[in-house]
């Protein structure tokens, strides 16, 4: 497989990025592989195929989030990155779409990263952040996070001053493989 095609766009829809293999449940223009992620079946790729996986506004539609993380780990190579974006649970966008089956906190991957939910996989957190939208309208949220932190924001402010999206970057670590090189900040 060519180096440029070693990137997977999960749930790409009709907006697949150039250089990515597009996976979606419908044959939209640009989709390379049609597959239902809610089937519970293994993804149609060999182990260790991808160096980068992106899942933009897809995991909130999945019935089995742990299956998603197990399969992403399986099809990724050691040191691959997994980029996820999903609505924050306080966002109107999380609740307005009737096809959303899950609503996520910024910390929803903590038990995946620490290995307690998927003991045969290893992920490392590279970065997690919230987006809030327009800078002027979201000044209270941004100030709260800057002063008191993300956990405090979720505990005390999320419903009063909603966030927009969660953005996560994770590194996949394969057991028995050499340690991946550090990611440049």
Image (cartoon, rainbow, N blue to C red):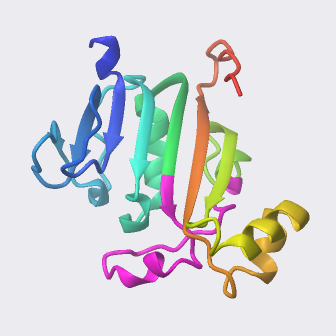
Q: Residue at x 57, y 76 (%)?
A: 89
In front: 158, or 43? 158
145 within the magenta span: no
Residue farthest to the right? 147
The percent position of residue 73, horizontal first and vertical second, equals 49, 36
Foreground: 92 or 115?
92
Image-based side of 21 in relation to 28, left or right? right
Asked if residue 121 shows in the view, the reply is no
- In the figure, residue 159 lies in which quadrant? bottom right
Q: Quadrant of the C terminus?
A: top right
Q: Is residue 9 left or right of residue 79?
A: left
Q: Residue furthest bottom?
A: 160
**Position of the N terminus by quadrant:** top left
Q: Which residues are magenta?
A: 85-111
Residue 124 drawn at (x, y percent)? 68, 37
Decide: is 130 above or below 97: above
Q: From the image, give the main secondary structure of the stretch colored magenta.
A: loop
- The answer to which quarter of the image holds residue 5 is top left
Q: Position of residue 94 (x, y in %)?
A: 46, 76
Q: Is residue 46 left or right of residue 28?
A: right
65 lies above or below 119: below
Q: How many marks?
A: 0
Residue at 47% from the left image edge and 73% from the top image edge: 102
110 or 131, which is in the foreground?
131
Residue 92 covered by magenta stretch = yes
- The picture places residue 21, in percent across and down from the top left corner, at 26, 32
Q: Residue at x 30, y 51 (%)?
A: 11
Q: Residue at x 18, y 50 (%)?
A: 14
């Amino acid at each position: 497989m060519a180096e440029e095609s070693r990137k997977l766009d999960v749930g790409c829809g009709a907006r697949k990025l150039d250089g990515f293999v597009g996976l979606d449940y419908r044959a939209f223009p640009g989709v390379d592989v049609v597959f239902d992620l809610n089937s519970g079946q293994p993804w149609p790729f060999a182990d260790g195929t991808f160096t980068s996986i992106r899942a933009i506004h897809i995991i909130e539609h999945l019935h089995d989030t742990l299956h998603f993380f197990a399969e992403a780990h399986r099809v990724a190579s050691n040191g691959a990155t997994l980029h996820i974006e999903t609505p924050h649970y306080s966002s109107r966008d999380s609740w307005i779409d009737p096809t959303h089956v899950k609503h996520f906190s910024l910390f929803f991957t903590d038990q995946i990263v620490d290995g307690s939910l998927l003991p045969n996989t290893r992920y490392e957190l590279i970065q997690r952040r919230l987006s809030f939208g327009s800078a002027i309208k979201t000044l209270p949220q941004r100030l709260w996070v800057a002063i008191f932190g993300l956990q405090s924001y979720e505990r005390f402010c999320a419903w009063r001053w909603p966030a927009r999206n969660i953005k996560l970057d994770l590194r996949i670590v394969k057991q028995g493989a050499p340690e991946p090189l550090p990611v440049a900040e």
